[in-house]
Image: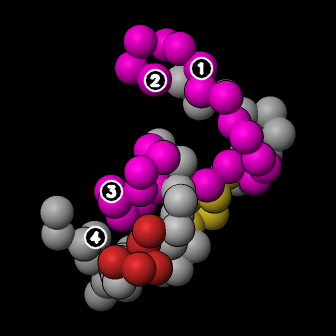
Amino acid sequence: MITIRLRKNGPYVIESDEVQIVDWNGVPYTIGRRPAALCRCGASTTKPFCDGTHSRKGFQAAEAAVPDSQDKPASP
């Protein structure tokens, strides 16, 4: 099973060595380090990978995997 963990106010972290990330043309990216961290804030200079910019930009995510939570996805 592949697990994708959302770090609080941070990236999507893919916790598997058996995952491939491909662009819209089907061309695979080289994943430099594991676990792979994908940008969630939209400000990374190494998209689709996270470069830590979220912490400097003050990215705030509202998502939570809690049934009946009052949290809503952040507005674009």
| Residue that appears at 46% across and 23% down | 23
Mark 1: few, some, or many residues within 10 Å (few <14, many ≥20)? Answer: few
Mostly what secondary structure, the magenta segment?
Answer: loop
Q: Are marks 1 and 2 in contact (CB under 8 Å)?
A: yes
Q: First in sequence, mark 3 or 1: give its number.
A: 1
The span picked out in magenta is: 23-47
Residue located beneath label 3 in the image: 42
Q: First in sequence, mark 3 or 2: give its number.
A: 2
Residue 23 - label: 2
Residue 5 is drawn in which quadrant? bottom right
Q: How many marks?
A: 4
Q: Are marks 2 and 4 in contact (CB under 8 Å)?
A: no
Q: How is the image coloured?
A: secondary structure
Residue 28 - label: 1
Mark 4: few, some, or many residues within 10 Å (few <14, many ≥20)? Answer: few
Measure how far apart labels 3 and 1 are at the Cα level: 20 Å
Tag 1 secondary structure: loop
Q: Are marks 1 and 4 in contact (CB under 8 Å)?
A: no
| Circle 4: residue type | Pro
